[in-house]
Image (cartoon, rainbow, N blue to C red):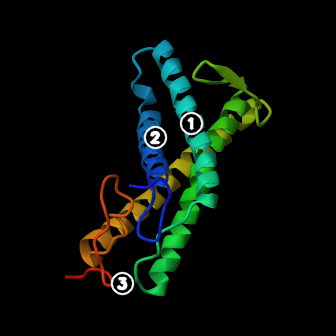
Amino acid sequence: MTLRSNDRQWGSVAKFFHWTMALLIVGNGIFGLSMDLAGSKMQQITWLALHKSIGLTVLALFLLRLLWRWRDGRPAEDPAPPWQHRAAHVTHGLLYLLIAAMPLSGWWFNSVVGKPLQFFKLFNLPAIGTADQEGVGFAHAVHEYLFWFLVLVLVAHVGGALKHHVFDRDNTLLRMLPFRRPRATDGQGDRS
């Protein structure tokens, strides 16, 4: 497996960013929805601080991923109708937008609440909005609705990958899976 992507598959760095970010996003989403299960107020504060730090980690990885993606190659697209290619491009664009918007909206929400934002208790980040107790509900709603929109787009993304793998039997999913090589094809996808 190579570090860089080529015309047949994604490289190990692109796969690392994809799967690490996927696990962090899904895990942090579940974690965020579970905050009310904290046994005490102190545990809830600890969990919330961890949730924020994981979100900031996703944002940092996203920025690194963009830099890598700008310089990295990409596999050729498997044959598909033009509308499917357009749908995939729109879905990926929305994913990238939402992956950036989620932690930024959380950072903004934290700023509106007026609390300091720490990254794993290592350092504080500056506020990206002014404290405004009247705007707390709106800021929280923006963060939450962006999350549910992200869930919908992720379902479409995973559904598309599974459709390609199960029904089209092409390499769309295989070339992103760690430690897997794409199937040999005749250029038309392996539909046997």
Q: Does the CB distance between marks 2 and 1 fall below 8 Å?
A: yes
Q: Label 3 amino acid?
A: Gly
Task: Give the x, y percent position of residue 7.
Answer: 46, 71
| The C terminus lies in quadrant | bottom left
Residue 116 in view here = no
Q: Which residue is mark 2?
A: 24
Q: Residue at x 45, y 76 (%)?
A: 77
Residue on which disc 3 sits: 187
| SS category of the residue bearing label 3 | loop
Q: Is residue 68 above or below residue 174?
A: above
Mark closer to the chain start, 2 or 3: 2
Alpha carbons under labels 2 and 1: distance apart = 9 Å
- SS at circle 1: helix
- Which amino acid is tagged 2? Leu
User: Which residue in the rendered view is the most extreme toward the right?
Assistant: 130
Q: Are marks 3 and 1 in contact (CB under 8 Å)?
A: no
Q: Is residue 25 visible?
A: yes
Q: Which dot, 2 or 3, sits closer to the camera?
A: 3
